[in-house]
Image (cartoon, helix red, strand yellow):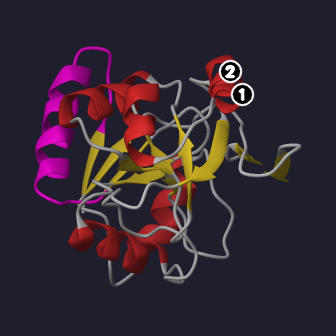
């Protein structure tokens, strides 16, 4: 498990390495606009399986997905005009929207009928999404049942002792205090908040 610390002068170098590793099917810990997250190519079955092992997450519990823009989202899910209007107001940002998935969306670690999607408001993750041109997993970097964290030391403490570990940890120190994203189900009317 390699740990890289982001400094003002090395962000593009770290981003290049992260992009290469994601393309190779590796799992990374990355800072996001909410908490530290576990990021990998959501279209790579082996990578997603590894993520579930690292997180000790039940395979029946789906992971949310980061997308780079609405165009990418529309390839994966059905979005009507009303939903699009809502998404344009809240994205990029801390809202994960649950939408009906398209039958041909080749993603792993998901519910069969829906996907939780989000465009994050975080430069590094957006860069990874843009350069890999893939939907990426956007689940918190913690062991299932333990709290997600904005503190890099807490993330390391949880992951260092595990048998399965991420391939790279990108640290920026402690993130501003935040909770994981708010989850809103857009498949029902009126829309329902599943997690505040």
In which quadrant of the rendered view does residue 166 lie?
bottom left
Place of residue 54 in the rendered image (x, y in percent of width and height, measured from the top left): 40, 74
Question: For this view, does 150 lie left or right of residue 7?
Answer: right
- Residue 184 against residue 56 in the figure, above or below: above
The residue wearing badge 1 is 82
Place of residue 18 in the rendered image (x, y in percent of width and height, measured from the top left): 21, 41
The residue positioned 23% from the left and 35% from the top of the image is 133
The residue positioned 36% from the left and 48% from the top of the image is 136
Q: Secondary structure at mark 2?
A: helix
Question: For this view, does 158 lie left or right of residue 50?
Answer: right
Furthest residue to the right? Answer: 190
Q: How many marks?
A: 2
Q: Which mark is residue 85?
A: 2
Q: Secondary structure at mark 1?
A: helix
Q: Nearer the viewer, residue 86 or 182?
A: 86
Place of residue 106 in the rendered image (x, y in percent of width and height, measured from the top left): 30, 60
The residue positioned 51% from the left and 71% from the top of the image is 112
Question: For this view, does 81 lie left or right of residue 38?
Answer: right
The boundaries of the magenta stretch are 5-27
Q: Nearer the viewer, residue 108 or 103?
A: 103
Within 10 Å of disc 1 (Cα), the crowding (few <14, some 14-19, many 20+) is few
Within 10 Å of disc 2 (Cα), the crowding (few <14, some 14-19, many 20+) is few
- Residue 191 against residue 155 in the figure, above or below: above
Q: Are marks 1 and 2 in contact (CB under 8 Å)?
A: yes
Residue 76 visible in this rendered orientation of the protein: yes
Place of residue 147 in the rendered image (x, y in percent of width and height, measured from the top left): 69, 63
Question: For this view, does 172 lie left or right of residue 45?
Answer: right
Q: Is residue 13 magenta?
A: yes
The residue positioned 71% from the left and 51% from the top of the image is 187
Gap between marks 1 and 2, in whole Å? 5 Å
Q: Nearer the viewer, residue 91 or 100?
A: 100
Residue 195 visible in this rendered orientation of the protein: no
């Amino acid at each position: 498990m390699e740990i890289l610390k982001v400094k003002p002068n090395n962000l593009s170098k770290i981003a290049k390495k992260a992009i290469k590793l994601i393309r190779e099917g590796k799992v990374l810990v990355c800072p996001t606009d909410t908490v530290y997250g576990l990021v990998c190519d959501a279209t790579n079955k082996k990578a997603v399986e590894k993520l579930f092992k690292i997180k000790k997450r039940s395979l029946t519990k789906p992971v949310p997905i980061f997308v780079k823009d609405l165009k990418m989202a529309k390839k994966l899910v059905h979005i009507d005009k009303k939903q699009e209007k809502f998404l344009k107001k809240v994205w990029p940002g801390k809202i994960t929207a649950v939408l009906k998935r398209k039958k041909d969306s080749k993603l792993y670690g998901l519910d069969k009928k829906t996907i939780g999607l989000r465009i994050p408001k975080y430069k590094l993750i957006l860069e990874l999404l843009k350069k890999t041109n893939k939907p990426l997993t956007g689940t918190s970097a913690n062991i299932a049942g333990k709290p997600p964290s904005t503190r890099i030391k807490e993330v390391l403490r949880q992951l260092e002792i595990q048998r399965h570990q991420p391939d790279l940890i990108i640290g920026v120190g402690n993130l501003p205090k935040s909770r994981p994203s708010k989850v809103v189900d857009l498949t029902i009317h009126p829309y329902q908040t599943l997690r505040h």
